[in-house]
Amino acid sequence: MKIRTWKRMVNHGFRNMFRNRIMSLASISAITAALFILGLVLVVVMNFNNVAAGLESKTEVTVFLKSSVRTSDIKKIEQQLDHREGIKEWEFISRMEALENWRDEWGDKKHLLDGYNEENNPLPDSFHVTLEKPEYVAEVVEEFNKISAVENVQYSKDAVDSIAAIVSTVRIFGVVIVAVLVVMAMIIIHNTIRISVYSRRREVNIMKYIGATDWYIRWPFLMEGLVLGLLGAVLSGGLVAGVYSLLLNQMTTTPQQYNLLSLFQLMPLASIIYPIAAMFLLVGSVVGISASLLSIRKHLRV
């Protein structure tokens, strides 16, 4: 197709959009509303996923060493921790460090522990290990329990199981909700553009009767659907960004004691808006083009 023909098709698409301003406005409004609702749900899902990822990173295991442990044994365990898959970070806590931490935890009553010193310190050396995911807990516990220098390995099984269940539920629920809303948005957009095309069925029939090819008729409608989809995506993206910005500002300006949202740390705007904007542009353009293509198909059969 020649460049001049392409320009003509694009001009016809824009001309048709402005000529049918009411239907074009209805299409843009429907696209904006559908994607805006989808965007709000995506914001919630992304933030909950972020919280779930934070919970995963708080999975911790404590490896207690025997009182007879040697420096060489500690070095071997450190090397094993450095190369073990699934370990995010670790910290060695000596017997004396553990005793000092114990005193700090007791606060005003730390004088009760004055009788303990380096010779009679009842606390063992230990490693405080943070795992990447709860799924690694069983393997890590089993592996370190086999080391002769290890007295025992402790972790909160109930807490780990709860974190794993919460993370799994949040992610499955989020995927299902987003998938349902994407389908609903596509149906709404498709039906709206379909009505717009139907209102101009006589125009299509006349062009068909005077000898215009199917693709000559299709292209202006496809361009129109693309522009409508992109306009709706831009407007809905702007609305989502505006609402999210207001929510972030509310969290930062409201006094901490009155701010219920302070318990829920929201992600930065940049981390939210770019993925959502990309998805909106993709959904809006693809659905706009496909809806126009499907809607005009039966009117070409004359």
Image (tube, grey):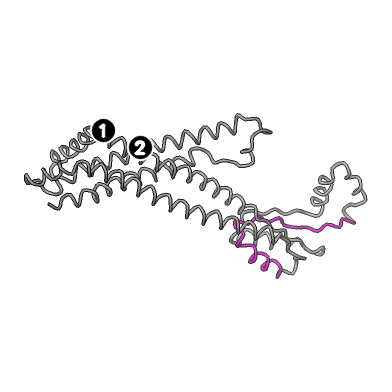
Relative image position of residue 111 (x, y in whole percent) = 91, 45
Q: What residue type is labelled 2?
A: Ser
Is the residue marked by circle 2 packed among few (<14), some (14-19), or many (20+) residues within 10 Å? some
Relative image position of residue 226 (x, y in whole percent) = 28, 42
Query: Residue 279 or 274: which is nearer the viewer?
Result: 279
The residue where tag 2 is placed is: 29
Residue sitting farthest toward the left: 210
CA separation in Å, label 1 and label 2: 12 Å
Q: What residue type is labelled 1?
A: Arg
Q: Does the magenta stretch include residue 136?
A: yes
Relative image position of residue 124 (x, y in whole percent) = 81, 58
Residue sitting farthest toward the right: 115
Q: Which residue is drawn at 43% across and 35% down?
A: 239
Relative image position of residue 77 (x, y in whole percent) = 69, 62
Q: Which residue is drawn at 7% across and 46% down?
A: 211
Q: Residue 33 falls in which quadrant of the image?
A: top left
Query: Residue 286 or 296: which is nearer the viewer?
Result: 296
Query: Residue 185, relative to residue 85: is it above or below?
Result: above
Q: In this view, does 171 lie to the left or right of 207?
A: right
Does dot 1 land on a helix, a strand or a loop?
helix
The residue where tag 1 is placed is: 21
Magenta range is 120-146
